[in-house]
Image: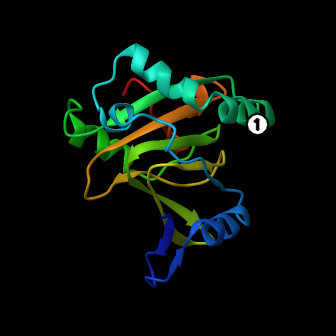
Amino acid sequence: MPKIVFRDTGETIEGVEAVKEFLEKYGVTYERWGVERLPKELRENYELTEEEQQAIIDAYKEELEKLKKEKGYVTEDIVVLSDKTPNLDALMEKFKREHHHIDDEVRFVVDGSGIFPIKIEGRIAEVHVGPGDLIVVPAGARHWFELDEQRKIKCIRVFKTPAGWEAIYNENEKATMND
């Protein structure tokens, strides 16, 4: 179940409709697509072949095409983070730094879970996501990403252009997808 936890007060918002309603006020899209249609082996496998990655994307073709048409996205891929990911801790240090993008950050969680802390009106709202959750953090929104205690997540990412995904930490420091 999705939830939002405010770091300053511990206040919590829980449930699909409550999370969606709160985030929409700040331009963040939250939807629930579910993962029931995926075979267990595709959900739980963290060492996917290209064919398995494509099978996951194909399972959400209708939703992805609708999202792409509505928002102008053009491509998607799969990202997998787990203890099997080389240099996971170093990679997570980059994701855990506050940044923004010139494009939306779109993630559909296939398996695992994580936290998107987002700055909203000077507060940090931790958006906890899990299997079946779609989140779209709008371009320009200051945020970062953290793995939770599971230390694994598998997502479909959607882009307008790969360049739009580059993290901008501050006006003088930009990271690329290859960092």
Return the x and y of residue 19 as percentages of the image width and height. Answer: 60, 68
Residue 120 sits above or below residue 33 on the image: below
Q: Quadrant of residue 49?
A: top left
Q: Residue furthest top?
A: 51
Q: Amino acid at mark 1?
A: Lys
Depth check: give the residue in front, 165 or 169: 165
The residue under the point 66% across, 32% down is 64
The residue under the point 50% across, 34% down is 156
Residue 27 sits above or below residue 14 on the image: above
The residue under the point 26% across, 39% down is 82
- Is 2 displayed left or right of 24 in the figure? left
Residue 84 visible, this angle: yes
Residue 87 sits above or below residue 99 on the image: above
Q: Quadrant of residue 45?
A: top left
- Is 172 displayed left or right of 94 in the figure? right
Mark 1: secondary structure = helix
Quadrant where the C terminus is found in the figure: top left
Q: Say how many tags the image has.
A: 1
Q: Residues within 10 Å of mark 1 (few under 14, many from 20)?
A: few
Return the x and y of residue 127 as percentages of the image width and height. Answer: 50, 62
Return the x and y of residue 24 as percentages of the image width and height. Answer: 71, 62
Residue 80 sits above or below residue 74 on the image: below
Depth check: give the residue in front, 21 or 126: 21
Q: Which residue is mark 1?
A: 71
